[in-house]
Each structure stands twice: as C-alpha cells, then as structure tokens.
Amino acid sequence: MAQILLNAATATGAGTAWNPRDTSAVATYVQHSFQATGYTSTSTGAATVLIQVSNDGVNYITLGTITLTLGTSVTSDGFAAANTWEYYRANLSAISGTGATVSVYMKG
C-alpha cells in the first residue's frame, strides 16, 4: 500500500514528514517510487512538487521534482529512486488554476 505524502493539497507548503520505520512494516526498502496526481475544477493550471528527504528530520534536501500540467482530468507523473533516507516529505512549491488540487504518494 502506498504512503500518502500530500492529500488533496490546495496551497503551497510541505506535508508532514514520514519515516518508514514508524510503521509496523519495518522492512527498509532501497527502491522507492513517488507519484503526484492533480487536477483543476475548470480550465488549466500547473503544480510543482519537491520530493524532499532528510536523515535528521530537520534539514531537508530535494531528491527530485515532479511538474504537473493540470486540467479538468486527473494528470499524473512521478519517478523512482534508489535511496535509504530516514524521512520523506512532499513539498508543494507552486500551484495554480481554479480549484487546483494535488496529492502525492510514495511506495517502497
């Protein structure tokens, strides 16, 4: 099951950090995939999501960037990375469009 890093975000900002060790599934995976989805209620828009990682939960660096062109149908993009960071979060750095909404999921 995928971990939700952002759930229907409508404004810029970082989501709550997630630590894979905080779950009952303690297995540490090296391969992770990240997927952002989004849409607008009318017309078009855009969104930029930074996938950020940290080993101390305070100082984050950007692992990758997902850019979406939004429309009334759901759009999606993502990437995979081999890594073993302690904390993961999605940071919605830009969003535009009427009723624009973005969600981000992580698996692995």
Image (cartoon, helix red, strand yellow):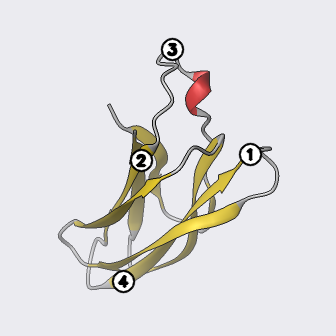
Provide the secondary structure element on which disc 3 rests.
Answer: loop
Choose mark 4 or mark 2, whichever is in front: 2
Residue 74 in the image: above or below residue 7? below
Residues at circles 1 and 4 in contact by the CB criterion of under 8 Å:
no
Task: Check disc 2 and report the residue beneath it.
Answer: 32
Amino acid, disc 3: Ser
Amino acid type at mark 1: Asn
Question: Foreground residue, 68 or 23?
Answer: 23
Name the amino acid, label 4: Gly
Mark 2: secondary structure: strand
Dot 1 alpha-carbon crowd within 10 angstroms: few under 14, some 14 to 19, many 20 or more: some
Does any portion of residue 89 appear in the rendered image?
A: yes
Q: Are marks 3 and 2 in contact (CB under 8 Å)?
A: no
The residue wearing badge 4 is: 45
Q: Whole-Å distance between the Cαs marked 3 and 2?
A: 18 Å
Pointer 3 or 1: first along the chain: 3
Tell me how far mark 3 sits from mark 1, CA to CA.
20 Å
